[in-house]
Structure formats: C-alpha cells, structure tokens
Amino acid sequence: MGMRIALVAPPFIPVPPPRYGGTELFLTNLALGLKDCGLEPVIYANGESHLPGIEIRWLFPRGEWPLATEPHASLKDLNHSSWACSDAAGSCELIHLQNAPGLAFSRFAGMPPFVYTLHHPFDPGLAMYYAHFPEVVFNGISAAQVKTGYAGLPRMEAIHHGLDLTQYQKGNGAREYLVFLGRIAPIKGVEQAIDAALLSGIPLLLAGEIQPIFQDYWETRIRPRVDGRKIQYAGELDLKGKNEVLGRARALLFPIQWEEPFGLVMIEAMACGAPVLAFARGSAPEVVGQGISGWLCGTVEEMARRAQGPLPDAACCRRWVEERFDYRQMARRYASLYARQLANRKSSPANAAQPLRQTGAVTPVAA
C-alpha cells in the first residue's frame, strides 16, 4: 500500500465535475495520476462524487452549485474543511488542500504536513493570510500566477495542470466555426470573442455557465448579440459535449480580461485538435505554443486576422498537449513535492504544527 494523500476539495461540486468545475477536474486527474505513481489518494468532496478505484469521503451528501449565499457557503466550506482535516489526520500521511479555510487547521498539534494549491489570481488579502502558515508548502498552477505576488511565500513553485488525454479525442470535423468556452463573465472576454468573430466573418459558438451573479450581464450585454446564426449559445457542456464542439472547431477564442491562473479549457481545446487564440495575459504564454498550437494576440483585430488563418493543424495541437500537459507528468511533480514536504517534516520536527499559544496579554478590568 502506498503513501496515503488526502486531497481536500471544496464541498460544492462533485469530483469529477459534471460540467463547470476546474478545481474538481484538476483533482480528478491528480488522483488518477497519483494512483499510477503508486500513492493512495483519498478525495474529500461531496457524496455525489465518484471516481472508480479512488476512495472518496464526504460530510455533505449532495453538492450545491451555484451557491445560495456567501455567508452560508463560507460556513459550509469551513465545516467541511475542519471535518476533512480532522478525519485525514488519523489516516493520511499528508493533506493537500484546495480551499483557504482548511489552512487554519494546520496549526493544531498532531496534524500531518500540508500542501496547498492556489487556484486563483493574486489577491492581497489571501496573500497576507497565507503568510501566517510558513510550515505549509504552497504551489501555484503557472509561473505567471506565482510572479504576480505570491513569490514571497516560502518554497513556492508552479506545477502546470494536466489532463487524462484518453478522455479527449482529436476531432476531424470541418472546423468551420469558432468557439468560446468558459464562464459567461466579463473577465473571460465574452464580448471580445464576439467582436473578434464578427470581424473575422466566421460563426461563433458560445458555451458556458451563466452564474446568477452574471445573469444581468448575460441579459443586457451578451444575449442581445446572440442571433442564432453568426453568434449561437449552446449552454453548458459536459465532457462529451466538449469533445464534440471542440473536435469540430476552427479555434478556441480566449480573449481574457484578467490574469488567468491557468485556463484548463486551453489544453482541453488543443487536446481535441483546436488551436487556441488567446490574449497574452496570465498563463496563456506558458500554455499556448506560438505558431505551434495557437497564437497569442494583442488585440481583437489581430485575433480576427489569426482566426482567418492559416492555423496550426489538429495533430500539432494534440502533440503539444501530449508532450507538456499529460496528467501523469503533473502527478509525478506533485508526488515529488509531497516527498520533499514529508522529508522536511522528518528532518525538522520543530516545524510540526504546535498547539495554539496566547500571544498577547489581557489586562483585567476592575469591577
């Protein structure tokens, strides 16, 4: 039996995710890869999760997405995280977190070593919070994400995501349309994708989740531009739908308006043979092979010109992902990270989590 690793997911979306859920898709691929490496992953998620050959433990039997209210969600996440860390402390040799509330439990005596993956762009408040946990090994998902403000965290490194490529087929369709696949939100560049497609004269298929917070954005800014011919909306896509849509697409448009930490959809598209046309922000320059698996663009106009061609062919796109973003490569890097963290704990027992101590004095108030 290999080393047992607790993979703690947020409790809201099943593992693997039926549709939306980048963190949950990452954990799916990581768990499978760790198992191939001879480790024994244990996923803490919700009761709707199911991954053959992988043990899954849960406190809440059902997922909850989209979230009802922020205070409710925060308490549910805290409840799930505290239970997961407590349970894993008795049966696992290392805890790998994806959610911030769980970090607080790394302070308690008797806890295993912790690893924490950052799935979000730089946030000053979170960076300050993370700095209070020097015994935790933090890792990012792209070099760009780490450099934006998290480089000061101790032992920080970047590990790219990977896919189980047996789940993605290189399509051989006519590739006569463009695709935008992602959350229907301003930061994802939905309007810019529409603009680029209209300039190029090539039809665009929009696909992705419309979260309640962005319903007004959809109704006022995007839906009026969906005419059913030049611009179509296909709703959310599951894995089968992604294969079908991306396998026939001319290119994926990725005109992000923020510093994207990774962008799993880019490697999903390339795995299906669709080149990626992306703005050169965030992780895009690390993920897209310029002229090999897509093009990095500076403007909507350049994106439109690139969409008209010539474009990298499907075989080149697929090969780019196979060589760089296979889930087994990702898992080997995490296994190495775990081993180093465990070795650090064994060589420096003083670094182990200690009971909380009073750090300030309280002056009694006279009656």
Image (cartoon, rainbow, N blue to C red):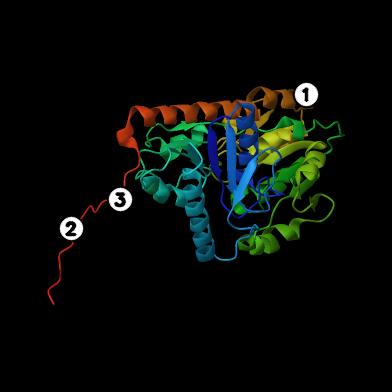
Foreground of the two, 265 or 351: 351
Mark 3 or mark 1, which is nearer the start of the sequence?
Answer: 1
Please, what is the three-letter code of the amino acid marked with disc 1?
Ala
Q: Say what secondary structure mark 1 lies in.
A: helix
* Numbered mark located on residue 315 in the image: 1
Reply above or below: 229 against 42.
below
Marks 3 and 2, the one that precedes in the sequence: 3
Query: Where does residue 17 sit, x and y in percent of width and height?
Result: 68, 47
The amino acid marked with disc number 2 is Ala
- Residue 202 in view here: no
Question: Between marks 3 and 2, how big is the CA–CA gap?
Answer: 15 Å
On the image, the x and y values in percent for residue 112 come to 43, 39
How much space separates mark 2 and mark 1, taking CA atoms? 66 Å
Q: Which residue is mark 3?
A: 356
Q: Mark 2 vs mark 1: which is more N-terminal?
A: 1
Label 2 belongs to which residue? Answer: 361
